[in-house]
Image (cartoon, grey):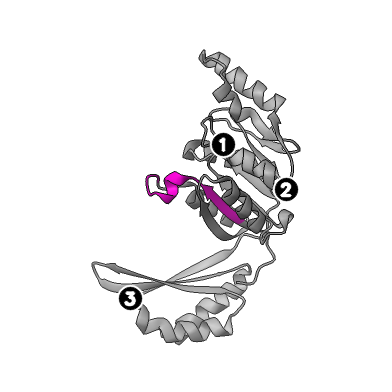
Amino acid sequence: MQSDNPTAAILLIGDEILSGRTRDLNAHHLAGILNGIGIDLREIRVVADDHQAIVAALRALDQALGGAWDMVFTSGGIGPTHDDITADAVADAYGTVLEINADARRMMEERWTKLGMEITEARLRMARIPVGATLIENAESAAPGFSIGGAHVMAGVPSVFRSMVEALVPRLNPGRPPVSETIRVDRPESDVADGLREVAGRFADLSLGSYPFRDEAGFGTNLVIRGLDRDRVAQAAAALRDRLAL
């Protein structure tokens, strides 16, 4: 699909994802939001809790560091434990240092005081923010994420991640949300492949995909047409119906 929308990648950070211990929910959630506001998600990458791996991934993904995409959304590794090293790696990647951010500390201490929680060195780790970064508010647990360069650095806990995304989205520069049309065909995917290929060639500016399924009626295929121009999508759908005699 031809698009002039901003581009993005999601970087998932955590040994627990790579080991299969934790199933990621954050990329799926964010992908739907980005699609809805016209930011083209082009890549999802997973790396371990490894300093150099995180730095290398940011350099490969964030255009501000010479990488491929306009922005990067990270998930994981900004908690209070020893293996939460994302903030350190981000500071390294962007050539800055970490310090206790006064606003982050204030927000967290206000919440801890209300809950009767002790202020500890471990909890204060979550107030360490790269110098020059902008905070991403967190209504769920107060400890903020942050934005620097083209990166938006957020927590891995799904409820906290969603809270940060909600705060972040109004700050993003959206594009044109794509429109789509789905055509259900009660035939196997192999029966519609030639017709789909032919129509896709005529509408190279659009994205045409096939998604097979099986239900109580047998095999079928959902044909999905996506693009930024509603009329163009409608034209492709009409051509596809005509080609498949639907």
- Residue 75 on the magenta span: no
Looking at the rendering, the stretch of residues picked out in magenta corresponds to: 9-22
Q: Residue 116 location in percent, x, y?
A: 52, 13
- Which element carries disc 2, helix, strand or loop? loop
Residue that carries the numbered disc 1 in the rendered image: 78
Q: Residues within 10 Å of mark 3 (few under 14, many from 20)?
A: some
- Quadrant containing the C terminus is bottom left
- Look at the picture and state if 49 lies above or below 195: above
- Which element carries disc 3, helix, strand or loop? loop
Residue at 51 percent across and 37 percent down: it is 83
Q: Is residue 83 left or right of residue 136?
A: left
Mark 2 is on which residue type? Gly
Residue at 54 percent across and 33 percent down: it is 79
- Look at the picture and state if 135 lies above or below 241: above
- Which residue is situated farthest in the left direction here? 216
Q: Residue 187 location in percent, x, y?
A: 33, 78
- Quadrant containing the N terminus is bottom right
Query: Gap in Å between the C-alphas at discs 2 and 3?
Result: 48 Å
Q: Are marks 2 and 3 in contact (CB under 8 Å)?
A: no
Q: Residue 90 location in percent, x, y?
A: 65, 44
Residue that carries the numbered disc 3 in the rendered image: 186
Residue that carries the numbered disc 2 in the rendered image: 149
Tag on residue 208?
none
Q: Residue 67 location in percent, x, y?
A: 68, 59
Mark 3 is on which residue type? Asp
Is residue 212 among the parts visible in the rendering? Answer: yes
Q: How crowded is mark 1: few (under 14 residues within 10 Å), some or many (20 or more)?
A: many
Mark 2 or mark 3, earlier in chain: 2
- Residue 10 on the magenta span: yes
Query: Gap in Å between the C-alphas at discs 3 and 1?
Result: 48 Å
Residue at 53 percent across and 14 percent down: it is 118
Mark 1 is on which residue type? Ile
